[in-house]
Amino acid sequence: MTKGTVMQAEDVDQFPEEVRNQSTEALKRLRDADLTKPVDVQVDDQEPITLPPVVLSLLAEVLAKVAADQPVSIVTPDTIFTTQQAAEVLNVSRPYVVKLIAEGELPATKVGRHRRIKASDLEEYRRKQYAASRAASRAMADLTADWEQDD
């Protein structure tokens, strides 16, 4: 039922040392490059491929994860998550995700008795939560500064 591209952490237990070393070296070379301009990459004896800056920054993120032997997940906006998968992404419980859906905080569709959440909706929810958290932190900092001025 899942559409889109998703690579789960359990798909790769551990990256081989050679792959980690190659990723580390490639990451060093990418960091030395001007990533505001396209870069030509040559594969074997084929014609070079031009990679745009946005792709280079994504590639650098993937290389950093592989070099650190961390799982890599690629999720497209049209990927569909179950409530359990959404809970894992948000680092909350599945019942909490169901509650968010019931309260209209997180859009979802029903497939039979099951709820499904689009990755784009999940990312939008995370973005809003992050913005709210930042605003609350700023408010607390302002309040603390006001208290300090009163002393």
Image (cartoon, rainbow, N blue to C red):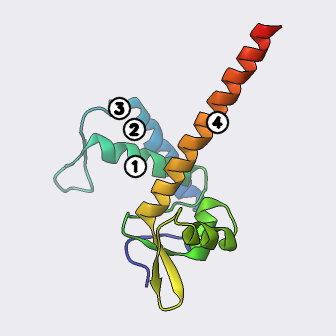
Cβ atoms under marks 4 and 1 closer than 8 Å: no
Is 107 drawn above or below residue 136 in the view shown? below
Horizontal and vertical percent for residue 54?
A: 32, 44
Kindly report the distance in space between the C-alpha atoms of the residues bearing marks 1 and 3: 13 Å
The one nearer the camera, 100 or 85, is 100
Tell whether 26 sits left or right of 133.
left
Horizontal and vertical percent for residue 141?
A: 69, 24
The one nearer the camera, 76 or 121, is 121
Tell whether 103 sits left or right of 109.
right
Look at the numbered disc 4 and give the secondary structure of its residue: helix
Kindly report the distance in space between the C-alpha atoms of the residues bearing marks 2 and 4: 37 Å
For marks 4 and 1, the one nearer the N-term is 1
Q: Is residue 41 visible?
A: yes
Categorize mark 2 by other alpha carbons within 10 Å: few (<14), some (14-19), many (20+). some
Kindly report the distance in space between the C-alpha atoms of the residues bearing marks 3 and 2: 5 Å
Q: Which residue is mark 2?
A: 30
The one nearer the camera, 129 or 22, is 129
Q: Quadrant of the C terminus?
A: top right
* Amino acid at dot 3: Ala
Cβ atoms under marks 3 and 2 closer than 8 Å: yes
Disc 4 versus disc 1: nearer the observer: 4
Categorize mark 4 by other alpha carbons within 10 Å: few (<14), some (14-19), many (20+). few
Q: Which residue is mark 3?
A: 33
What residue is drawn where x is 46% and y is 42%?
27
* Amino acid at dot 2: Leu
Tell whether 62 sits left or right of 85.
left
